[in-house]
Image: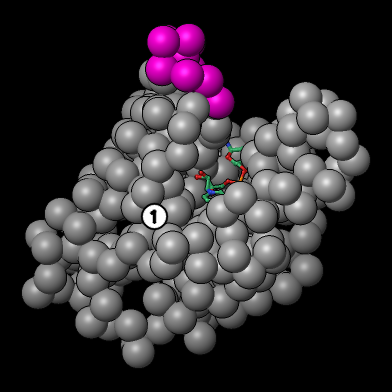
Amino acid sequence: MLKGKTALITGSTSGIGLGLALAMAQNGANVMLNGFGDVEAARAEVAKFGGNVAYHGADMRKPDEIESMVRACEAQFGAVDILVNNAGIQHVANVEDFPVDRWDAIIAINLSSAFHATRLALPGMKSRNWGRVLNIASVHGLVASAQKSAYVAAKHGLIGFTKTAALECATTGVTHNAICPGWVLTPLVQKQVDARAASAGVTQEEAKRQLLAEKQPSLQFTTPEQLGALAIFLCSAAADNIRGVAWNVDGGWVAQ
Ligand code: NAD
């Protein structure tokens, strides 16, 4: 379905980003990976589908590196047709204890990088009158949890940004939408499972059960594969008129 299209996915060396990269490659897209994880393992996994795979190591805190990533993708594949703003980090602390450098990093990576990559990829998308920008927000773009002030602020901001960009492109073939996962068992969440297991003195399985029971009524983690399938749908012609939505995949988290 995406043969001839190119997908640039930030933060795609692990977790959700890697899942989205695999879905894009499986559907025939060229893929540019980014992130600080195991690059060669990610590249090999995505290459299994036989398409073209590239990597750029831009740091999402740095606008000039984001620019060189977008330009490298255009130079290598001729376009950025699908931009997935996925890179993200987390830090958990009360507001008065929140380290200032963590606040700044979360806003830069989880919010501002999406602005930079979008503003740089948009002229090409508009000139071809086709594009998909998928912003990986979170249920924390829709509701809050204590001790996640920077993350919640960034993700609420990302959804606001998605809506504004969608309106600006409403009469074009470029759509902007946000995907809002609940708990997905990735390295980002594994750190929170480890912290809970250590502080409550419980097993990994019990820590996962507790984490889900607090927020996610299905008591099941959302998977990167499920998010990949939604991303592919949002790239399809059936989604041509889906613009500015924040689509939660959260086992009922925000229905409560
Ligand atoms: P992850 O830690 O597995 O992946 C994060 C990716 O971002 C990695 O590839 C990492 O190397 C990359 N990254 C981190 N800092 C970077 C930087 N400065 N520059 C470039 N890349 C950088 O985490 P994940 O859970 O897969 O998270 C992916 C996205 O999904 C994030 O935006 C996160 O907020 C969001 N999300 C995750 C969950 C969840 O439950 N795991 C839920 C909702 C939303």
* Ligand 1's quadrant: top right
Above or below 62: residue 132: below
**Residue 6 visible (yes or no):** no
Would you say residue 101 sits in the magenta stretch?
A: yes
Quarter of the image for residue 48 reads bottom right
Q: Is residue 62 left or right of residue 184?
A: left
Give the amino acid type for the residue marked by disc 1 in the picture.
Asn
Task: Tell me the crowding category of disc 1: few under 14, some 14 to 19, or many 20 or more residues within 10 angstroms, Cα based.
Answer: many
Determine the residue located farthest toward the bottom in the rendered image.
Answer: 238
Above or below 31: residue 171: below
Q: Is residue 31 left or right of residue 47?
A: left
Residue 169 in percent (x, y) is at 14, 65
State the extent of the magenta-drawn residues as a range: 92-102
Ligand 1 within 8 Å of disc 1? The answer is no
Q: Nearer the viewer, residue 63 or 176?
A: 176
Q: Residue at x 28, y 67 (%)?
A: 245
Mark 1, residue position: 135
Q: Secondary structure at mark 1?
A: strand
